Image (cartoon, rainbow, N blue to C red):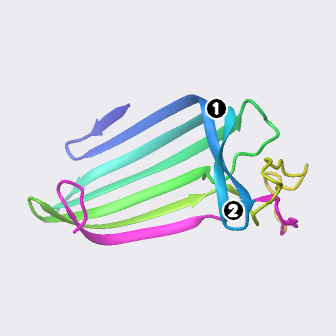
Amino acid sequence: MTHLLGRRTFVEAALFRSDVSNSTQRFFVQPNVFQLRNLGEARFLGGEPGLGSALPGRLNFEANYTCLSRRNMTNPGLLMIDTPRHKIYSALAWQPAPRVSLVADLGYEGGASTRTTPAVSGGRAITPPPGSAAPSGFRGKPTCKPGCTTPSTGTISWWTGIRRRDGRSM
């Protein structure tokens, strides 16, 4: 759903649900070597509000936030890892010529559970021991043995450069 606010600004929102029949995930078979393995059925639920505006001086601003919840429906005890629960993205672009834009963007990803060290199990999938992932609202330092999962603290990234109107970087 997109709603125009005046002539230059819009807000948008989306809700989504995906029922995936063959979801995959990384499983380490030895340090620094992993395989993508089928987890079976999974459900992804989420939402994404966004905002964009054409600013004076040939500037354009956009920002959005995404919240994602992934659930393994085949094996609920197997934690789905490496996908951020929260993503924030913003960009400011200046267009000095019709086919050239200077872009600066900033992004944040956080809330993903990640495996602290590769777990080796002779080619079998390893389910983390009960209680190895920090519970919601956890305030202390997690104590995690090798091979268990722990919530990540998040990643901030940015990019600046020149982008052509067709979206390719120069």
Is residue 49 shown left or right of residue 57? Answer: right
Amino acid type at mark 2: Ser
For the N terminus, the quadrant is top left
Q: Which quadrant of the rendered structure holds the C terminus?
A: bottom left
The residue tagged 2 is 152
Residue at image point 72% right, 67% down: 31
Q: Nearer the viewer, residue 15 or 25?
A: 25
Spot the residue most to the left: 98
Q: Is residue 164 left or right of residue 148?
A: left
Q: Amino acid at mark 1?
A: Arg
User: Element type at marker 2?
Assistant: loop
Relative placement, left or right, of 35 versus 125 is left
Q: Position of residue 37 (x, y in %)?
A: 66, 44
Front position in the image: 141 or 114: 114
Magenta-drawn segment: 141-170
- The residue drawn where x is 83% and y is 69% is 141
Measured as percent of width and height from the top left, residue 65 is found at 49, 49
**Distance from Cα at disc 2 to Cα at disc 1:** 21 Å
On whether residue 150 falls in the magenta region, the answer is yes
Side of 160 where 88 appears, left or right? right
Residue positioned 50% across, 32% down in the render: 15
Which residue corresponds to mark 1?
43
Residue 151 image-quadrant placement = bottom right
